Amino acid sequence: MTFPQARQADIALLLEGTFPYVSGGVSSWVDQIIRAFPELRFAIVFIGSRREDYEDMKYRLPDNVVHLEAHYLYDFVAHAEKPKPRRGSANAFARADRLHEAFLRDDAAAGACAAFSELIRDLMPGGRLPEADFLHSEEAWRIISDRYRKNCTDPSFVDYFWTVRMMHAPLWKLARVAHELIPVQAFHAVSTGYAGLLGSMLRRTRERPLILSEHGIYTKERKIDLFKSEWIRDNRNIFQRDPTELSYFRQMWIRFFEWLGRLCYDSADPIIALYEANRLRQVADGALAERTCNVPNGISLQRFAPLRALRPETPPPVLCLIGRVVPIKDVKTFIRAMRRVANQMPAAEGWIAGPEDEDPAYAEECRHLVASLGLADKVKFLGFQKVEELLPKIGLTILSSISEALPLVILEGYAAGVPTVSTDVGSCRQLIEGLDGDDRRLGVSGAVVNIAEPQALADAALELLGDPAAWAAASRAGIARVERYYTDDLMFGAYRRIYQRALAATGAQH
């Protein structure tokens, strides 16, 4: 596939595992933002794991995307020749070692960020710490061996050695991307993690503004993944292992992603959250409070409000989970809830509308669960659907997730007059019950339940669908809330001001 290429652009969007290769909330938001500013020329830097993990693009690129490049952090090229021994720069490795020492001390954030600034240029092509030295030099072996003896509580040096390699290998790829990226006026990372680290490298080497938008808190989401990951080893025997402690390698990965977040926070201004609880989390994780702000997601009333007229007079007994079929959405809790719903409301159906290709094994488990609960005629897997076609046919949007930020699907449902039942994650309680006095006076626009409680989810849905007056009141509250606080006009206005400030800082005129 041929990507658009340009000599320069206005804004570089730094995207990890989202647009244009993955559909869903953050990707849809990126598409919205690009299309909202046709006067700006966007460059997209997509960062993925391996090329084989991503299929064709899920979005047509807007005309103002003038440049696209995709990089895969764990696509390694096999070399036919045996690598030659290398000594490695003791000074460069000493700087890297000081950085790692700072990472181990929670009170050393400023020192670590300063050390990282010094180290970036060593990692760049032509720098004093090339990837080959990290992989094959005597100095690298000495540093890794010393750190294992000094810090590691896991008995396996082999696993430690390869964990360090896997953890650090992407740094040189990101440094190369930062070195070769076309000239742009400002950078906009849509997460911390590897995209945020790239943004930090670019901010420090090119002295251009870095904007950070976090939909979910990346570090928190990676912790959830790492707690569940089966590929992380724990080689301690039953006598060495404290069941209250995480394995050393799991701790290594968690600390690594925590520091990626801190390095990005140190470089970015502004640091944008979707809602207040996440802004406070950013501050707790190391962001300067004066750099943080909230810009909620917004949706198009023009697109969704007309759907209200297409609804039947009474709410359809259809519960619809709109989202990817992946563990973080906890689709299994929704399926289990449907067993109770179907028992008490035989006409009810549960729809699962979202792609299944991101985690096929989990999707297959969900289908087996449907069969084992005898719900084959009640729970339907629809695959990816146009949300405008779904909303007039359903009575409730359902979120059974174990982690969310500010879900667009709730707002889209509200604009179409559809209430929601959601787990108490992210901003969902704020969206359903209101944030402050004025917001709460609009009324409750659905129900909030605890994570992984299918009975509570089922009962909340049954209560709303079984009481037309309560359902209608929730529908009116949702419409009022989205119209007052969550329109795309409000969101675009905020980002217009943010982009104008960033471009003005570089002397660019738009």
Image (cartoon, rainbow, N blue to C red):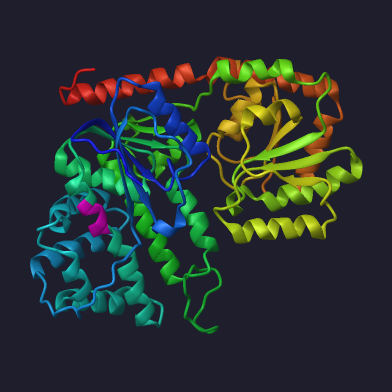
> How many numbered discs, if any?
0
Which quadrant of the figure has residue 255? bottom left
Which quadrant of the figure has residue 265? top left
The region drawn magenta spans: 171-176
- Which x, y percent locates residue 113? 23, 49
Q: Residue at x 67, y 49 (%)?
A: 331
- Which x, y percent locates residue 218? 43, 47
Q: Is residue 442 visible?
A: no
Vertical side of 275 occupied by 252: above or below: below
Q: Is residue 387 visible?
A: yes
- Which x, y percent locates residue 171? 26, 58
Q: Residue at x 29, y 53 (%)?
A: 107
| Quarter of the C terminus within the rendering | top left
Q: Quick one: 109 or 457, which is closer to the camera?
A: 457
Viewed as shown, does residue 234 lie left or right of 466?
A: left
By secondary structure, the bulk of the magenta-drawn segment is best described as helix
Vertical side of 85 occupied by 429: above or below: above
